[in-house]
Amino acid sequence: MTESSFDRLNRREFLKLGATGLGCAAFAIPGFAGETKGHEAEYYEKLKDGKIKCHICPQECEVTNRERGTCGTRENRDGKYYTLVYGQVAAANIDPIEKKPLFHYHPTKKAFSIATPGCNFICKFCQNWEISQKRPEQVKTVEFSAKNVIFNARNRHCPIVAHTYTEPVIFFEFMRDCAMIGKEAGIPNVMVSNGFIQEKPMRELCRHLGAVKIDLKAFTDDFYQKICGGKLKPVLDTIRVVKEEGIWLELVVLIIPTLNDSPREIDQMTKWIYRELGPDVPLHFSRYYPTFMLQNIPPTPPETLYRCRKIALNNGLNFVYIGNILTEAANTYCPHCGSLLIERAGFAAEIVGMKKNRCAKCGQLIPGVFD
Amino acid sequence: MNFSRREFLQRCVNSMAYFTVSSAFPRVFARPIKAASRVVEVRDDKLKRVGDDVNPEAAGRMLNRALQKLMQANSDLSAWKSLFNPRERVGIKVSCLPGRKLSSSVGLVHAIVEGLGLAGIPAKNIIVWERTARELKEAGFSLSRRGVRVAGTDEYPNGGYDNRITFAGSVGTCFSVLMEKVDAVISVPVLKDHDIAGISAGMKNFYGAIFNPNKYHGNGCNPFVADLCTHPLIRDKLRLVVLDASRLQLQNGPAFFHRYAMEYGGLVLGTDPVAVDTVGWHIVDRERVKKGLKTLKQVNRLPGYIATAEKRGLGHMQGAYIDRIIL
């Protein structure tokens, strides 16, 4: 018998594999998980003939035996529904909280940031598609318990844990457990999400989370359907629920030229935010860069972002930021006297004009969670 | 787009020839010529599964008989040789998601490998593959690195998928590296009902060749299955479809349900994936009706992606263009 010709590597593949091997050897962590393990999922309904209906997100996937939902992370195994990503961490980093971005939530602090593979959307512009769009078995993961996440955060001097990079809704059970333990330990958890989650699980999360950042991808259902594989209304519903539950909330809109940058759409969106959430919800307009499946549109011109910001400010919003470019529009100014409160450059931030949660100059109360 | 001098001259000559001939014979060239696609269906009690597998010898006899008819060849040797070149590397894409009871049968795959051997393809240039090694093992295949390779995409570096995003109509994805490593592909799925897509057959089998199939199950997988199959990696490499209909699943697929499974003892072969899937669909519908079930149309699960595939030029769906031969 001769060796199969399908295992031969070319020089480039050989070198890459060698480098990967060395990397793995250098950073090996016990519990490296190569196969998909199962942890029974929550929020699902058993249908007839062994089928399952998932109620974690508004996709409401009906899943037959051995199949998975749109997220690729929840599997029907003989009529029982399993999440394959509980504790399967594909990325763990220490980030400034400004990177989420959460600008009014413990500014300048570090967040122990984690993600598992998978997402319930298929955003054509996803920056993290190499973990968000893959199935669990296609991504290298490290196994963490919820306790271990909080332990790691504390050990690394991070007062916050962020569930981010991919879509935390699909690892709901793990995030919820981390948030529960974190709350008891004094390490709040934050969720960086697309907001595509059903009301019940979202309300349950709100009991344990410290803050939520939601990506409002656009203000048209057409964009949500064609570019993200989702729907607008459930996201707006989630935003309302988070506000109603009193959790600190910030919104981000990635502005993509020609797709969601029309002045009319931004006007409607910011009027809705003002009407439903009030003037004090921070809103971030971020610059898009070509990536994943959206390579044919150039990066957002800075002028477009300034124009969006102007519309939002004119519609009464007090804290409108611009992200992914270096600009003074990333600073926080007092809405009453205009003083500089927090200065930011990239992800670096410095509190320069605040006393506790008030403007140092005029005493104006600044909404948010400050130390 | 860059052409070499040779390619440029070749294209000029081709264009001139086309315009000259088409102006001389406008009726002939006014519309594309539609040659009928041959689909061969063979059915025999010996092809029914014993336990969860078919007898490889019986499968081999039926397969070769059907292939001779399909290729209009007068021997097994010439039939296989008319499809494959001895220097090619051939991938056999099996379907193993539902476990042993409803996966591509090992005996049939064994017979296909023997046939490729007849065509002069060395064992080391044949690979039997599926998404994961686990699925292959659960379906009864023995993973192998020597001789005929039996492997899951996940055994290859970086999860086994190319890291470049590639597009095919509405589908954006990364392919299994195995699709790039082979010169020709044989699609060997189990013919079955599919709760979302209507049926799962030769074309949908390629959902197992991409990294994000879960993103393309909306709207009965239409147009996604068809779009995916327009990708050159599939369109240009798919050489033969062999539907394993030894055991059919008529309802509640793709999982195995004893109540809706039947021992059919059949194979469906063709080189036109649209025509083969069309015949497969008709078989499922016919057997559903015999069992007292409604047709897929009546239960609102028409496999619409087949019609889309025809519109994309991947093959024929209309009966008039399918030369269906039943052995």
Image (cartoon, coloured by chain):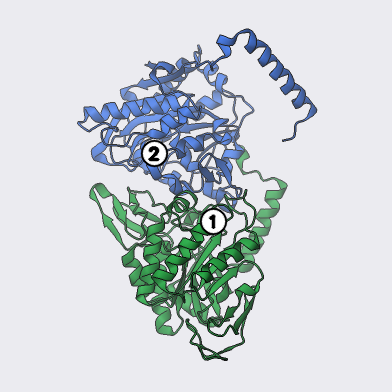
Chain colours: A green, B blue
Question: In which image quadrant can residue B32 be found?
Answer: top right
Q: Which of marks 2 and 1 is in front?
A: 1
Q: Total of numbered circles in the picture?
A: 2
Tell me the tag on residue B103.
Answer: 2
Left or right for B284, reference B208 = left
Q: Which residue: 47% across, 48% down? A: A226
Furthest residue toward right: B5
What amino acid is found at the position of numbered circle 1 in the picture?
Ser
- Asked if A253 appears above or below B167 in the picture, the reply is below
Quarter the N terminus of chain A occupies? top right
Classed neighbour count for the residue bearing mark 1: other residues with Cα under 10 Å, few (<14), some (14–19), many (≥20) = some
Instruction: Kindly indicate whether the residues beneath marks 2 and 1 are on one polypeptide chain.
Output: no
Residue B207 in picture, x, y percent from top left: 46, 41
CA gap between label 2 and label 1 equals: 51 Å
Residue B123 in picture, x, y percent from top left: 57, 33
The foreground one among A164 and A308 is A308
Furthest residue toward left: B292
Left or right for A8, reference A228 = right
Kindly state the secondary structure of the residue where label 1 is placed.
loop
On what subunit does the disc labeled 1 rest? A
- Asked if A140 appears above or below B68 in the picture, the reply is below
Q: Can residue A103 be seen in this view?
A: yes
Name the residue tied to disc 1: A262
- Asked if B20 appears above or below B85 in the picture, the reply is above
Question: In which image quadrant can residue A26 be found?
Answer: bottom right
